[in-house]
Image: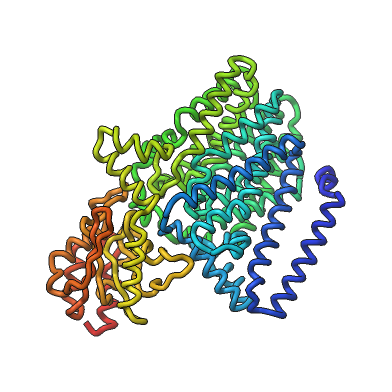
Amino acid sequence: MSATLSKLRTSWVGRALLAYAVSALALVVLGLAAPGSAIFFPLVSLWCNLALFGLVLVVLRLADVKFDLFHWAVIIGFWAAALLYFYWAETRRSFVYIWDYVNYINKQYNAEAAFLQGPAVGFHFILDSLAEDYTNFNTLFLEFPFCLTDRTGDSFAICQVFSIVPMLLLLLAGLVVKVGQMLQVKNRFWYFLIGLSWTFTYPWLRMSAVLSQPDWFGLIFAFSILLLTLDFRFEKLDLPRFGLLFLATAAIILSRRWYLYFVVGYYFAYAVLVLVSSARIAKVGRKQEALLQVRNLILFGLMSMVAMVILLWPLVSHILGYDYADHYSYYNGGGMVTETYLQCARMGLMNLVLMGMGLWFCFKRRKMPALPCLAGLEILLSMVLFTRVQTTGSQHMLLFLPGWFLLFLIGAAALAEGMNRRRNLKIGFWLFTIAFATSVRCSPLTTVALPDFLIGRTLLSASPQESARDFAAIDDLVYDRKDLPQIKAIASWIDTHCADGEIAYMIPHDTLYCPDHFKNCLLPQTPINGKLAFGFSVPGTHYFPMQFFEAKYVLTADPFPLTHVNDPENEMSHKLNDMFLAVRDEYFALEETFDMGNGTTFTIWRRTVAPSRAEVEYYLSAFTEEDAKYPEMFSQVAENWLAARGL
């Protein structure tokens, strides 16, 4: 412990701590003196980012990672490339943010509104979300520099280059150096260049971030955990390291709930690694050291679990009391077999080849078998745990990336160490892989990493399967919307024809068209946010839509959009639309139509007959299977609504 403290006992640490303390005191004074100040929340966010940046530097120092001029030049160059990439990706398309892709943006708007009411209201907004699946923890770090922009969805995505990428890139570079140290890589120049570029350009690292879903914020804490543990075997009670591990573990869970699967998988695999290490040193007569490692591991684990439960009890109790596997069953596309296929497909052939080279490198030279075993066990356990709930989407790949990146880096070491043999071929392989990875389209419908030109042109013209061509065509429509003027026109119509207190209901709830497209087409303005009801589509997640019966207008589309990949024919919005069309003329009159310019026509119907029990029961009869499984979301909701209206 004294050795660890000596690393931290430097002049810059003292000055930094003093600066953080003084600035925190200044924020307290500002909050008391001007509780509704518009600059308070941005300054709090700036302070949080600087504090986190300081902790990142401490993690790197404790991990014995030092960057020289070459490292810093590569890191700064990659950050500049990320800025150019995000600006290019966001400004070349016309994308409307929906569902999870607007969720964080709305949270940011809500956090801003809460802090404008005062610091107490703002921090209550942050803490009050600890029992939710999406906590408001991330807003503390994303507000600055978002507050300096036009606050649109695109600017929210680009701002991640300033609020997330610097710390993420530093830790990823540190991880590259740390793995190189453990593998005793001699060709450090090529290893660092190949390792950092291969991991940082991996498409699934940035996929959700480009869509304004900054879940990769949690990787800051995941990489911190790796750096603090990879070569640490609990030989001593290292309190600073333990404190940072605890903070990183709590923070990664708060950043996104499903990172918990990484936490459980990694710590279990790491505990196995420590126990194996203890057994090996016990065999050579160092039993006292082995027992000390095991004791420290158990002591740290028990203390951390107790502290974590106390600190995050609202979140823990919610997880224990909610059956995610049942309510998320719609997203479970096939269990371990399907998940294994998806993982391999998302890796791509070139990355699989790289990892194969790394495994052969470790086997041939008998170097550090612990690293591939640790990574493989973590990935396997996380997959087993996650697939008990659902199959992964693109954003969920982030929880597996720490393990995959360890395997990537072992492959990078193998490539770098053999660079003198077939040098041009290996450099060409590396450059082609990076070019391919950076050109991947980051779309909500991306399931396999393909470059934009393949999706937009080759696949459309050459695919022998009609379903693939249709999927690519829909992907084009969603990724770069040509119907934005029509979407804005419908939103304007709703705003004009629905007075305060009146609502419209839109039946389509799909990637191609859903209420969010119309509510969020003018961000940061949301004039119809209270005039257009939320949609209804996913069993176990969406409640029976009583606002359909309260709406002044009902909107539907022809042909009805069906682009979900799970089970489109059984989506609840499809059933609701069929029921609506069958009795439409009894309750509604045609009001307006809109040609979307892509083969879809939206029709607006005005309710002419007040809703009755018979009408509610008619629609409810289409969902007997869902009602039997989730009565609290269907018949109970309907009965409460009817009772409140004397029906």
Seen at 21% across and 62% down, the residue is 577
How many labels were placed on the picture? 0
Can you see residue 142? yes
Position of residue 543 measured from the top left corner of the image (x, y, whole percent): 32, 66
Q: Quadrant of residue 46?
A: bottom right
Position of residue 435 measured from the top left corner of the image (x, y, whole percent): 51, 33
Position above or below: 34 against 305: below
Classify residue 309 as left or right of residue 22. Answer: left
For this orientation, the residue located farthest to the top is 421
Classify residue 188 as left or right of residue 112. Answer: right
Could you tell me which quadrant the C terminus lies in? bottom left
Position above or below: 527 against 479: below
Can you see residue 310? no
Classify residue 13 as left or right of residue 399. Answer: right
Q: In terms of depth relative to the viewer, which is nearer, 402 or 288?
A: 402
Could you tell me which quadrant the N terminus lies in? top right
